[in-house]
Amino acid sequence: MRFSHVPRSIRQISTHILAIILGVLLTAGTLRVAPSQAEPAPVAIATESSLAQKPSPANAAISNSSFVTAAVNRVGPAVVRIDTERTVTRRTVDPFFDDPFFRRFFGDSYSQQVPSEQMRGLGSGFIFDKSGLVLTNAHVVDKADRVTVRLKDGRTLEGKVQGVDEVTDLAVVKINAGNNLPVASLGSSGNVQVGDWAIAVGNPLGFDNTVTLGIVSTLKRPSSQVGISDKRLDFIQTDAAINPGNSGGPLLNSQGEVIGINTAIRADATGIGFAIPIDKAKAIASQLQTKGKVAHPYLGVQMVTLTPELAKQNNSDPNSQIQLPEVNGVLVMRVIQNSPAANGGIRRGDVIVQIDTQVITSAEQLQNFVEDTRIGQTLQVKVKRGNQTQQLSVRTAELQNAQS
């Protein structure tokens, strides 16, 4: 259509109508692209609808918060409280009777006062067998004169320590309450990933049946980094709140399966707790059931991880009494007398770089390697001693009395 053939008045009306139509379209387009803050309802409704159809994983987890309830309901009846009693004798010397002159008349039996003190402890545990077997930490029940186990249903039973392993800080306690007790479902710590949900259940500070929620912060945290170098463990680290009294209680995944045993905390930190992986606990518990103890092989050395950088720092120090090879390996700081290492010829200052065919680069790796060997097995240990390389034969022995 050509406007030259249309009267001017009509052309003006048409122009106004076109302007109005364009204005309406632009306004409508603006509303669709950027609705005003004064009227957010249409956008909110559309967003909620779309989320309802396709929820993101984060929103799904938040909306499905009942997974914690389901997990606790599944395992909670099997979680127990453990109370212990122990008589401790403290020997104090009386200065009066310490004098040899008075001991001539009264004898040595009067030279010391022997007061006794009743020590009480508190921990957690969980039933892992219907016959009444409870898994907990060794430090919860070790050396206790009396162990009392309280079930969630209120029953209180005497517990008998069936086996303790201080090296892995695990213990098995037996209670007699029939053969139909609730049992915790054991998962696999091998399937755990950093970021997974972690649910701690136990009796922190005596507050029974307490549940805390967090995530798995990291895996395979060596016990030496945790500050308990006398243990042979790689921990699951979690930020789920763990406090004294939680020891021995289960750490659960989102399905309510036990993935770890809550064991340690850092007193100087918040949100840093540690659990023994359940796969390790299963193996130890099996031996404690049948034998009452666990036999651990050992070499008999105190050691630290050595790197070329650390060796260079040592060698450049004018006060250093020994020159170290600038390699990756394990530096022997001390050799225990009459140990397999001493009998095999390992010396202080040696750097262990290989055992059999396995290259050794850290103290944790060496400890784990030895732990997986048999007692009495002969190992070929390659060490760097100054500028020389030595090949030594070391026969492992059984670890006794928590030697390192």
Image: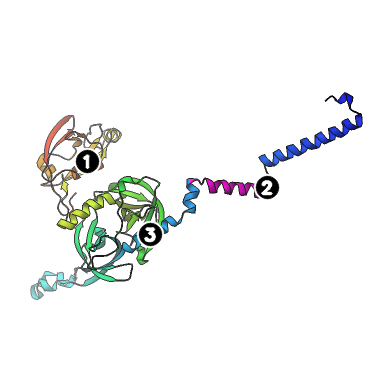
Q: Secondary structure at mark 2?
A: loop
Sequence-wise, the earlier of marks 3 and 1 is 3
- Few, some or many C-alpha atoms within 10 Å of disc 2 (few <14, some 14-19, many ≥20)? few
The type of residue carrying mark 1 is Leu
Residue that mark 1 sits on: 366
Q: Secondary structure at mark 1?
A: helix
- Few, some or many C-alpha atoms within 10 Å of disc 3 (few <14, some 14-19, many ≥20)? many
Residue that mark 3 sits on: 72
Q: Secondary structure at mark 3?
A: helix
Q: Dividing the image into 4 quarters, which one contains the N terminus?
A: top right
From the top left corner, tell me how far across and down residue 26 is, in percent.
Answer: 73, 37
Which is nearer the eye, 320 or 343?
343
From the top left corner, tell me how far across and down residue 8 is, in percent.
Answer: 91, 29
Colour mapping: rainbow
Q: Which mark is residue 37?
A: 2
The residue depicted at 70 percent of the width and 38 percent of the height is 29
Whether residue 242 can be seen here: no
